[in-house]
Amino acid sequence: MYFFLRSRHFCSTFPVRNIEIQSSRSKMFMVMFRCLIEDLYGLCFLNAVYSATLSNNGRIEFALIDWNWIEAITREDLAAAKYWLARQNERNVLDFCPGNHFFRNNRIYPEFFVCPHGLSFLYHKPLHILEVNYRDDWKVRFRVLNYFLSKNSNEPFLFYRSSFGISYQLFSSFVKYLTSESFDSPNDLSYELFYKFIKILDVLDPISSDFLSEFYYKLYKDGLMNSISVDIINDSENYRLRFFNEKKRRRPFMYFFGVLNDFLDACLIPNISTLSIFKKKNQSIDQFDRLVLKISACSLDFLMPSLAENAHIFNWLLSVTEISGFYFDNTEFTFNPINFKNVCGFMHPEIPKKSSDPLQTVPSDFFIILNDDNQRRMQYLRFVNVDICFDIFETLLYKTNISYFEVSYCSVDECHKITELLEQMPELNVFILHGVGIRPDDLDRILFSKIEILVLVGCIFESDSVWISKESPDFVYEIMKNLRTLNVSASKLPIDFLHILLHSFNLENLNISRFEFLPANSSFSLISLRKNRYSLQLDKYIPNKYLEMFSRTYFANFLSLCDSFIFSDIVFFFNIGDLIDSVKFLDLSDNLFPAEFLTLIDNFKNLKKIKLSASLPSSTVGLPNLGIFETVMALDVSRNDINATNYDFVSKFKGLKSLSLANCKLENKLLKKIMTKDMCATLISLDLSGVDLCFLDFKNIVCCKQLKILYFQISNDHPLSYYCDYLELTSAKLNLNVLKVEIKGGVCFDDLVSLAGFSNLSEVKITCSTFIKTGEENFIRFNPKISNFRLELCLKYYNLDIDTLNILDEMFENCSISIVSPHLS
């Protein structure tokens, strides 16, 4: 069976152009394999495969316009021209003119010129060929060139189609600079070439690697650390504006942050719009609106001495990458991780955690170093688990337009030093405080601000203080016109203050989990609170009459009642008319209740998603048929013990598109009973991560005809490739889009090769113990159809040698791959 699967894998899953055999032994194997299968599959397919293995040896012909030829060209060069540009008439744009062009009878005159398309010599321009050995001579890899090679095209590589004309002379200089140790002298790199070289890099789309960092270090040393640095930074000829402004490109300049200091590296994390500076790690990482610079306090200690001499370069980098904010904390983002959603769509925002380590100081000198332009561009400031003095901001913030300001678990003597800054931030939209003591004046300043998102988590009102609103009961505070999201979880604040915030006209999202109300000092009404909201979170509910009355006036799409101290305290929520009509997503995780309480869920008439993580009763025997079994489309029962007396609750859902059984303890053979025919017909997302699966259990998954998202864990009974080959026999071959696999053992080259059979894969995350260096002789070059394909390989124990890394780099040179380990240094 396994041999049949692997044979089928070789014969049908890989696109012809993807196969690149890397050793003579592999070529011999393919020839023998061809002879073996010829009678079964026919000669057409096998001829195509065989020709693809020949490739073009990694050589590329660049066809370029030669400025010297425009002025004057010799007859010899004209006769030898292999490729030409042409246009139909004088008004048209030049385009590539394919086919064989020549002069009749070797007479190099316009009237003897022959174009296969019948166009006149006057409408042609010859192209000068520059042939390079890309595979052997170029250490830096480029996505554009990798893709060009994979096409095995008979045409040369052409730059003129891009928005930037690259001549033969310019590209020859670039190739020389890229492939040699240096120019003849640093003076050979002019201010103009500096920008043009970066533009060529941008056009070709480089893949992050140590070699790319070395190339940027050479540009840094020969350009920014040389006499031309003044010209580069001032840019009087506006080269950056001319070459990059059409796309507002910042990425090609970001790599310079990684060469500011020998101990630092940098990477872009697009999904959170962050550029991270961190201490160098031994990792193989492909990095890829507003861009924030994140610096750990530890890395800042290394950076500051470099800035003492190179502040002008640092300011230039901030300017060309348009950094508009800073994030300081005690953690290091060393790569761009693949963050998977919960398959059922329940996503709570990540909350910063208080560090037990001593807090390191963010020096005020850092902000003094910033020039006026970089200070004015500042829109974002975030401080988490650091020691920071806010005195410097009294003068700094007048120059900025801060829209996001956060102080979480920092060393702050008095909160008023923070809230006093609100007056200097009139454009502030997001204001976040964690673990800060609050005084009456602080509340007043918050109410008179234009904040749209207010987060006060774990903030305690001073016990010896009293707050009374100085305005009349019908006064409209500024914040009431703007507030959309309010999170006061785990805080202890005056009820009068909260009451004002709840009257905000546009409030949509509310989190008052574990909130403690301080006694009111004035009377108020709940009449005008009847509004339609998006979300209401009341986790760890503390009974309160005000909150109970308020909830009866509330509409919400999402309701969270997690981790209740006494479940009977929240039963009244299941009978509030407005809630049971409006709630579509219900989260009851980490609750303890008997099976009969599940019938209360049926009170919600429009439920689409339910989360019962660590809340499913041990027995649901006797539970009647509920309406939710027909209407709910997403179910999360993760972290539960699934046994013979409660599995039927899950199996009764008939139209599920998303199911999470993550970290469940499943009794033997129950998965087959859970995966009913109805469920398999509709399921799109399935999360079995942390569940011990044998292969017989796994076979039940392949019945899901529409499966696009799959998370699962496998033991050591079979390799990952065995599971993937089995999946390829199903509709998952075409449908599977996201795959996350946890392996108790190791992963090898064959396991990675098996991923190529899924034509629609966009993200893969493999977590395993080690990498097993076997199977590399059958290695292929991975050319996924999804352009932004990403692979993240997480090794519990990092054991990759240089040869293995080189093979992986070759395999995935057209993709984005990250190899990370908690033990990397």
Image (tube, rainbow, N blue to C red):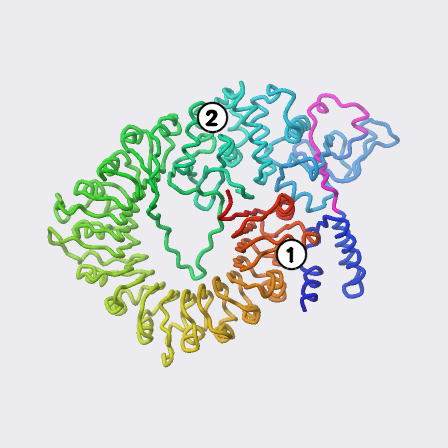
Compared across the picture, whether 428 is left or right of 527 comes to: right
Residue 689 vs 654, above or below: the answer is above
Residue 758 vs 644, above or below: the answer is above
Give the mark toward the camera: 1 or 2.
1
The x, y position of residue 19, in whole percent, is 70, 52
Query: Tag on residue 195?
Result: none
Which of the two residues, 766 or 823, is positioned nearer the viewer here? 823
The x, y position of residue 680, in whole percent, is 52, 71
729 inside magenta stretch: no
Residue on which the image places disc 1: 750
Q: Which element is circle 1 on?
A: helix
Residue displayed at 64% across by 27% down:
181
Which of the two residues, 428 or 146, is positioned nearer the viewer here? 146
The x, y position of residue 276, in whole percent, is 45, 39
Residue on which the image places disc 2: 313
Distance between the alpha carbons at the discs numbered 1 and 2: 46 Å
> Which residues fall within the magenta stretch?
55-79
